[in-house]
Image (tube, grey):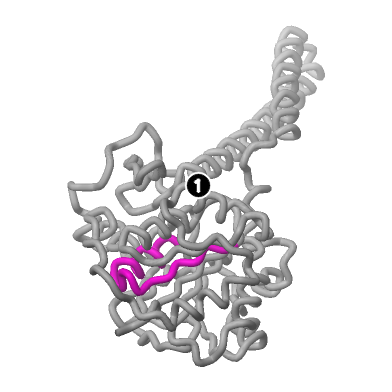
């Protein structure tokens, strides 16, 4: 009888230090495969496997499409690919981003839950916003085990706190120092009891969308109902659906957002619009003053007055927008810190 032999781990900002600690404190004979998603820029060169290989005794490598899942190995999602689990092997996908990430944590957790049910252990570590929350709910829906790093112990508490607030019956909320021992114990514990719950239709649909499956893409039975919001990634209509108290959105082409991630994207879009408006007003003011100078040389005084007034109006409006940008303290790009800008690995990860 197998134990909890599929351990899926999600981390974001501050995650390299946490993952390095896990790698250092897990033995090479652990009776489980460990599959990791760390948020990294799509076009970076990830050296996380090299870092984890130096830290511990478990063999670590970037996952390869179609690769068999073997106990005692660590698989890391490569940049710009979702890492998905099938029965017995790994699938890599360039499917739609989720919570603005690829790789994202939720697709890994969701497909692990679909394929392995009660054998799955989902681990959410340090990070901002809330990627991993919906995936951990999927793990619990299939009666897997949920572990969350204690928010006070995490370098960034957003992801752990979101999981705790939105996922029912989390099994362990632990400081990082206690997680390796629990993982080892779970890997040695046979999975007994009732069979896992059936795979919900929404989980099937979302797992297929991570691979841009054409049947799911063309399905008229999308979960939820059309919202009033547009997808920040492609401009399409977002469908709104609820998983307990968790509000989520997904568009026709598969881009998915939690409510927090969508709010962050809208804040980014608003900032972009403000910068565009500022540029347009500054350019219009500059052009109006150049035209006024030409009119003054021709002694066309009425045109000079009109153009100078127009330039002054543009400058006043630009000043308002400039003040808004300077005082902006919402969820903008300065909150998007995956990977962690203060982390040694993330600096290496972009080399």
Q: Is residue 332 left or right of residue 285?
A: left
Q: Quadrant of residue 54?
A: bottom right
| Direction front: furthest residue | 193
Residue 104 visible to the viewer: no
Q: Nearer the viewer, residue 255 or 198?
A: 198
Residue 276 visible to the viewer: yes
**Tally of numbered discs:** 1
Q: Position of residue 292 (x, y in %)?
A: 76, 20
| Direction top: furthest residue | 302
Classified by dominant secondary structure, the portion drawn in magenta counts as helix
Instruction: Kindly state the secondary structure of the residue where label 1 is placed.
Output: helix
Q: Is residue 214 left or right of residue 141?
A: left
Relative to 39, is 22 above or below? below
Residue at 24 percent across and 62 percent down: it is 197
Q: Bounds of the magenta span?
A: 105-125
Q: Does 315 appear in magenta?
A: no
Q: Nearer the viewer, residue 142 or 341?
A: 142
- Circle 1 crowding by C-alpha within 10 Å: few under 14, some 14–19, many from 20: few
Residue at 41 percent across and 59 percent down: it is 135
Q: Is residue 96 left or right of residue 185?
A: left
Q: Position of residue 139 (x, y in %)?
A: 37, 62
Q: Does 121 appear in magenta?
A: yes
Q: Position of residue 79 (x, y in %)?
A: 52, 71
Residue at which label 1 appears = 165
Residue at 20 percent across and 53 percent down: it is 218
Q: Position of residue 272 (x, y in %)?
A: 60, 40
Question: If the image is split into quadrants, where does the C terminus sit?
Answer: bottom right
């Amino acid at each position: 009888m197998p134990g909890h032999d599929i351990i899926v781990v999600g981390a974001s900002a501050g995650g390299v230090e946490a993952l390095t600690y896990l790698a250092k404190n897990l033995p090479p004979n652990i009776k489980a495969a460990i599959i990791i998603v760390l948020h990294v820029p799509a076009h970076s060169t990830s050296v996380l496997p090299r870092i984890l290989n130096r830290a511990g005794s478990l063999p670590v490598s970037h996952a390869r499409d179609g690769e068999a899942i073997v106990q005692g190995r660590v698989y890391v999602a490569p940049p710009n690919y979702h890492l998905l689990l099938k029965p017995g092997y790994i699938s890599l996908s360039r499917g739609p981003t989720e919570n603005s990430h690829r790789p994202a944590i939720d697709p890994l957790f969701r497909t692990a839950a679909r394929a392995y049910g009660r054998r799955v252990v989902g681990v959410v570590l340090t990070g901002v916003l809330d990627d991993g929350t919906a995936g951990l709910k999927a793990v619990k829906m299939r009666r897997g085990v949920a572990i969350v790093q204690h928010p006070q112990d995490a370098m960034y508490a957003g992801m752990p706190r979101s999981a705790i607030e939105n996922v029912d019956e989390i099994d362990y909320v632990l400081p990082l120092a206690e997680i390796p021992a629990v993982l080892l114990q779970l890997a040695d514990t046979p999975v007994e009891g009732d069979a896992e719950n059936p795979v919900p239709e929404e989980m099937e649909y979302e797992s297929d969308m991570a691979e841009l499956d054409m049947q799911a893409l063309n399905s008229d039975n999308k979960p939820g109902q059309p919202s009033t919001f547009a997808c920040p990634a492609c401009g399409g209509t977002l469908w709104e659906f609820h998983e307990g108290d968790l509000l989520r959105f997904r568009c026709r082409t598969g881009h998915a957002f939690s409510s927090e991630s969508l709010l962050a994207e809208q804040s980014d879009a608003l900032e972009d619009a403000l910068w565009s408006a500022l540029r347009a007003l500054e350019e219009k003011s500059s052009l109006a003053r150049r035209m006024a100078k030409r009119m003054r040389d021709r002694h066309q005084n009425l045109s000079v007055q009109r153009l100078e007034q127009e330039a002054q109006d543009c400058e006043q409006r630009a000043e308002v927008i400039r003040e808004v940008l300077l005082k902006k303290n919402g969820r903008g790009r300065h909150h998007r810190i995956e990977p962690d800008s203060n982390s040694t690995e993330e600096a290496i990860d972009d080399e």
